[in-house]
Image (spheres, rainbow, N blue to C red):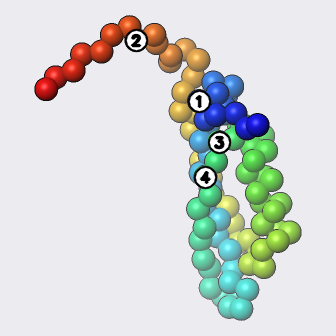
Amino acid sequence: MRATETERMLKGYGLTTAEFYYRMPDYRNVLNSFIWQDYDLAPDYPELFKFIEFWQGNIEGPLHSVRFTHRKLIAAGEWRNVVGEFRLH
């Protein structure tokens, strides 16, 4: 069973967003883009490289380039125990 998003973030995963530029199979002079997003571990990025291998093996449009960014959304030191909540209205 795959861990929840919160469990993955506490284990060091961060959100990785990649923009793939690829050539159209029938029109090699035309570049198209595709956005991919998943939780991944920096600096090795196993999920990103697994997707790139999938792309190269199964999709006809050859990759031109890949741009990506990675952001840890939460760290272990950022958790706080909230014991109360105030509501207005």
Indicate the position of residue 47 as horizontal and vertical percent values: 75, 47
Q: Which residue is mark 1?
A: 6
Label 4 to label 3: alpha-carbon separation: 7 Å
The answer to whether residue 21 is above or below residue 70 is below
Cα distance between the residues tagged 3 and 2? 26 Å
Q: Please identify the quadrant where the C terminus is shown.
A: top left
* In this view, 26 is above or below 41: below
- Secondary structure beneath dot 3 equals strand
- Asked if 56 appears above or below 12 in the picture, the reply is below
Q: Residue at x 65, y 42 (%)?
A: 39
Q: Is residue 44 above or below residue 36?
A: above
How many C-alpha atoms fall within 10 Å of the one at disc 4: few (<14), some, or many (≥20)?
Answer: some
Q: Earlier in the sequence, mark 2 or mark 1?
A: 1
Are circles 4 and 3 on residues that touch, CB within 8 Å? no
Instruction: State the residue position of label 3.
Output: 39
Mark 3 residue type: Tyr
Split into 4 quadrants, where in the image is the N terminus? top right
The answer to whether mark 4 and mark 1 are in CB contact below 8 A is no
Q: Nearer the viewer, mark 3 or mark 1?
A: 1
The image's mark for residue 82 is 2
Q: Amino acid at mark 1?
A: Thr
Q: Residue at x 78, y 66 (%)?
A: 55
Distance from Cα at disc 4 to Cα at disc 2: 30 Å
**Quadrant housing residue 41:** top right
Q: Residue at x 57, y 22 (%)?
A: 75
Of callouts 4 and 2, which one flags the residue occurring earlier in the amino acid sequence? 4
Q: What type is the residue that disc 2 sits on?
A: Val
Q: Nearer the viewer, mark 3 or mark 2?
A: 2
- Check the image and name the residue furthest to the right: 57
Q: Is 38 or 21 nearer to us in this picture?
A: 38
Please provide percent x and percent y for residue 76: 59, 17
